[in-house]
Amino acid sequence: MNLPLLLLIFILCFWAQRLEGAASSGPAEVNVGAIFTSRTINGRVSKIAIEAAQHDVNSDKSVLGGTKLSISFHDSNYSGFLGIVGALRYMESDTVAIIGPQNAVMAHVLSHLANELHIPLLSFTALDPNLSPLQYPYFVQTAPNDLFQMAAIADMVSYFGWSEVIAIFTDDDQSRNGVTTLGDKLAEKLGKISYKAALPPDPKATRSDVEKLLVQIRMMESRVIVLHTFSYSGQLVFEVAQELGMMEAGYVWIASTWLSTVVDSLPPLPPKTIKSIQGALTLRPHTPDSDKKSAFIARWNQLSNGSIGLNPYGLYAYDTVWIIARALKRLLDQGGTISFSNNTNLRSQSKGTLNLGALSNFDGGENLLNNILQTSMSGLTGPLGFNQDRIPWKPSFDIINIIDNGYKQIGYWSNYSGLSVDSPEVLYTKAPNRSIANQHLDSVEWPGGTRSTPRGWVFQGNGRKLRIGVPKRVSYKNFVSQINGTDMVHGYCIDVFRAAIRLLPYPVPYKFILFGDDHKNPSYSELVNMVSSGVFDAAVGDITIVTNRTKVVDFTQPYIESGLLVVTPVRKLNSIAWAFLRPFTPLMWAVTAVFFFFVGAVVWILEHRVNDEFRGPPKKQMITMIWFSLSTMFFAHRENTMSTLGRFVMLIWLFVVLIITSSYTANLTSILTVQHLSSPITGLDALITSNQPIGFQVGSFAENYLREELNIPQSRLIALGSPQEYAKALENGTVAAVIDERPYIELFLSEHCMFAIRGQEFTKSGWGFAFPKDSPLAIDMSTAMLTLSENGELQKIHSKWISKKACNAQISDFESDQLPLQSFWGLFVICGIVCSVSIAIYCYKVIRQFNQSYPHVTDPSGHGSSRSERVMHFLAFIDEKEEGHSSVRTLKRKRSSDLYESSNGNGIEDESRHNGRTWL
């Protein structure tokens, strides 16, 4: 045999031995346990799906190679104890993972065992949102938990406009915690669970238990019922509800995913069951369409022998097996081994009848758990994997409406974009949008066959009339009053209430009950408290919406604006001889007069040397200056200005005069035609500091506001019961002012013209109707009153009852009507600056001309002229008329030289006398 052939045989034998060693390095079999209740729908479906997955995994040698995946089943038979026993048996038999348990009751207990022995638990039905991965790190939920299911239900409740629901649930950990989560999600949407009704744990609920519970619910106000339970109890609830007439129009039933599993897995349903669930809404875990899913569905009848239909939890069961298989493959590929060791914590507990020493740790449990959480693959339910919170990717649900021929899908819910008629796969390609406008569902066929969305609640008492408390007023009966001493009432508030009731889409039986002693106006705070305590079902009247009241009742939309106002007496301004001085304050008059003479003087200075009309004897020039300044008020001055500076000053001054005269005319007209307040009270601040008595209406919230918010002593507050008492107290000075709400004040002033409002409204509120807390009628009435406002009906009712009748006179404050200097100081400043600048320019020009015309001349002895002589020359210069030519300046210089050469010191005086001039 040649050498190359021997070498080839040697190499082949070597590699065969290596391959055999590699194949034998992995375990021959890996044990996985499964804990389910075989008599439940999900238990039966899951067992078939898990067995199919086991077969497919072992048939695919690329997954575990020569290692066989062995899955054994344990029937817990609805018993938590048997579930724990089964788990302990698995942990004694070198089990690497457990699928299950089926419900959260066992999951909470078994998770502690899993944590201790490092054996992963994977469940697609124990979906309690309180199974925290921090507390239970070895427990993994492979389907979306109830947190997302309850978020979907809360979004549906909000979408249809309901605010309250009744929750019926099985009294176990999973259902109880799910309902708690629902309450949290509803609160985020401003809704709530009005009542929680617990059923005995499934399947212990009896028909008697259910009937007793539903009879109690039927007496309640809410008609939106969320049923979060299991298939046996859920079907029983619907059957009893059908018998009690609770599946008729007006009711809303929303079932969690248990109902969709019944519809999917138990066709055909019995006629009795089909009839009992007509119109109900339910959720189904959403699984996208794929070739894998279609192929598995096609196999299902063969796998199940037609014994039960497939539901999404069967798909999750199949994928869960594959998640474990892929994680085991990665564990083996990483060089890990399937080995177990004794638990040191149990070693000391092994004595006795319990064989706790048989329980052992899975050495590779932590690595297997990490591999499970790092899963990234495509399964029957779509992409498989977990986010950082260990939640399966992209949780979503189908929303199903049960109808005669089965069901119809009305939309989807996804954690990505909320409610939509488009599938989540379409939405994932777009930006997330959870806005209200983007939430959509198809039409629903509700219980009773109606397509109109139920309002979700009814009145308590099965048709009992609502007891409406109405204040029995003894004053201001335009708002609320009796009719001829009977219990019938009318008025502005009553008309608004009746108009709003007529707009409601459903009948509301009610009766008015008067509240008060007929001697004084009742306490409105007491009336509101009686609504809160249940004595009245609502309160209608002129009830102000204030903070303390909103804490105990719900108010409707305000139907009239209100706020506190101060009212004081007024008087007619007498026509006196000096009324023409009233438009301006004294300071304004003084400054105006000063500026008239100041501007006149400035113009005289600027015009004196160039304008013959501003020249002449001193007496004449004084009269001309005064006349010119005053005549500018009427634009009738006959003197013309010739200098540029004079004209500029006059332009500014005439503008100032225009503004002043226009303001004077307008204000004088107002003063002579309107009334003026005689009270020194100018508003709330002045009233508080005055220490004078203040009147308020009996029963009004104004008393508490003045005493508690403004700290006004009770001794200053005087209760007044009617408009007549208001008028009398204000006239005789018993009170300095009355504080009341705007609607009352408007009605009071329409008949009492000698009073007026002082200052601004110092509170902002409104009147509304009071209902018990969380009453849905308050919301509907608010909507109706907004409609009344928009269609103009509210204004018509207002005009009918609160229109002003007699007083139309304007009211003003005399002192505030006078125009002060502050209103015009800017004009005076501008005018003063212009005058000052003009004078400065003029002085500079005159001094420059004087220096050119009268240079400094020395006498023969070599001494210059004295200062007094030069001043006299300057005065003479500015008094002379300016000719504006160089020849005149030459003549003046010659004249000056002759004067200096003369030895007579009175030469200038003689010349002035000769010329007939005097110095000014």
Image: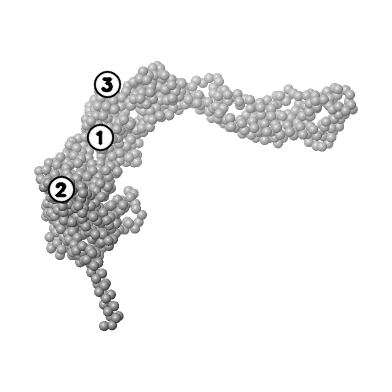
- Say above or below: 170 vs 900: below
The residue lying at 38 percent from left, 25 percent from top is 710
Viewport quadrant of the N terminus:
bottom left
Which secondary structure lies at badge 1?
strand
| Residue in the foreground of this view, choosing between 514 and 26 | 26
Q: Position of residue 733 (x, y in %)?
A: 40, 17
The residue lying at 22 percent from left, 32 percent from top is 534
Q: Position of residue 666 (x, y in %)?
A: 53, 30
**Cα distance in 3D space between marks 2 and 1:** 63 Å
| Residue highlighted by disc 1 | 772
Q: Nearer the viewer, mark 3 or mark 2?
A: 2
**Cα distance in 3D space between marks 3 and 2:** 87 Å
| Residue in the foreground of this view, choosing between 18 and 322 | 18
Q: Nearer the viewer, mark 2 or mark 1?
A: 2
Sequence order check, earlier mark of 2 and 1: 2
Q: Nearer the viewer, mark 1 or mark 3?
A: 1
| Residue highlighted by disc 2 | 350
Sequence order check, earlier mark of 3 and 2: 2
| Residue highlighted by disc 3 | 519
- Say above or below: 330 vs 695: below
Which secondary structure lies at badge 2?
loop
The residue lying at 18 percent from left, 56 percent from top is 94
- Kindly identify the amino acid type of the residue bearing the numbered disc 2: Ser
Is residue 463 visible from the viewing direction of this image? no
| Residue in the foreground of this view, choosing between 180 and 758 | 180
Quarter location, residue 471: top left
**Cα distance in 3D space between marks 1 and 3:** 28 Å
Q: Position of residue 87 (x, y in %)?
A: 16, 52
Quarter location, residue 624: top right
- Say above or below: 521 vs 136: above
